[in-house]
Every structure is written in C-alpha cells, then in structure tokens.
Image (spheres, rainbow, N blue to C red):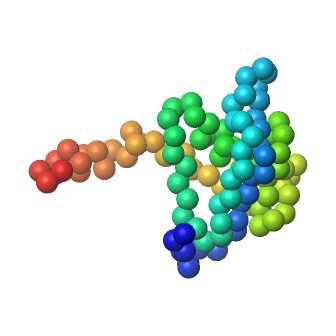
C-alpha cells in the first residue's frame, strides 16, 4: 500500500454492509477497508454501486444492514453533519481543460 505522509487521515471500514431499495439489492454484503494514509480508488461500471457505496460511507444514506466504522468507531447511526467527512463527485466530462489538452497534443 502506498502511504501518503502529509494526509491527516483515518481508516474507513465497511463491515457486511448491504443496501436494498425495496426488493432490489443495490449493494450485496460487502467488507471494505480503506486504511489510514492510503490512496484508494473506487472503480466500476455504470450502475455498479460506486456512488451508493460512497453515500453510505459519508452518511448520506443508511445501510440496510452492516456497520460503517471510522478509525474503529461505529458511525453507522451518526448523522452526516457529525461525521466530519466530505466527498466530491468527479466526472470526466467536467474536466474541460483536460479534454482540450488531450485532443490538442500530437503525442497522445
């Protein structure tokens, strides 16, 4: 694991987290550990549950089952306002400067 020494970070752990909406399962029982100081990337196809997983970690949605831990502390029922965590959605289409550079460079 690559360590990033300048980050003031904490570990995030999902323990058997499930998210269901009605009869549909959006996230099947999942265990995930994001270690303190690590650099993590969440990749997947459209509809794979990336955004739902991040919303569960941030506290924007409650899991149907399982626990969310910050630095070993169970924050599953802690409101989003008290979690001291944030997330930013990034879409490639919003990076207009990158696209312009990408298409104007002859070496790419």
The residue at the point 79 percent across, 21 percent down is: 22
- Please indicate, yes or no, whether residue 61 appears anywhere in the rendered image: no
Residue 37 in the image, given as x and y percentages of width and height: 61, 71
Instruction: Examine the rendered structure and indicate whether residue 7 appears above or below residue 42.
Output: below
Residue 107 in the image, given as x and y percentages of width and height: 14, 54
The residue at the point 54 percent across, 69 percent down is: 1
72 sits left or right of 57 in the view: right
Give the quadrant of residue 83: bottom right
101 sits left or right of 46 in the view: left
Residue 17 in the image, given as x and y percentages of width and height: 77, 44
Give the quadrant of residue 11: bottom right
Decide which of 5, 15 is in the foreground and name it. Answer: 15
The residue at the point 59 percent across, 41 percent down is: 50
- Please indicate, yes or no, whether residue 11 appears anywhere in the rendered image: yes
Residue ranking furthest to the left: 106
Instruction: Examine the rendered structure and indicate whether residue 82 appears above or below residue 93.
Output: below
Decide which of 16, 100 is in the foreground and name it. Answer: 16
Decide which of 81, 51 is in the foreground and name it. Answer: 51
């Amino acid at each position: 694991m690559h360590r990033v020494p300048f980050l003031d970070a904490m570990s995030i752990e999902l323990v058997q987290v499930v998210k269901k909406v009605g009869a549909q399962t959006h996230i099947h029982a999942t265990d995930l550990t994001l270690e303190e100081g690590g650099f993590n990337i969440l990749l997947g196809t459209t509809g794979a549950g990336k955004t739902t997983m991040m919303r569960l970690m941030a506290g924007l949605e409650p899991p149907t089952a399982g626990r969310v831990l910050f630095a070993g502390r169970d924050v599953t029922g802690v409101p989003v306002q008290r979690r001291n965590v944030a997330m930013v959605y990034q879409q490639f289409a919003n990076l207009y400067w990158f696209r312009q550079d990408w298409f104007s460079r002859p070496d790419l």
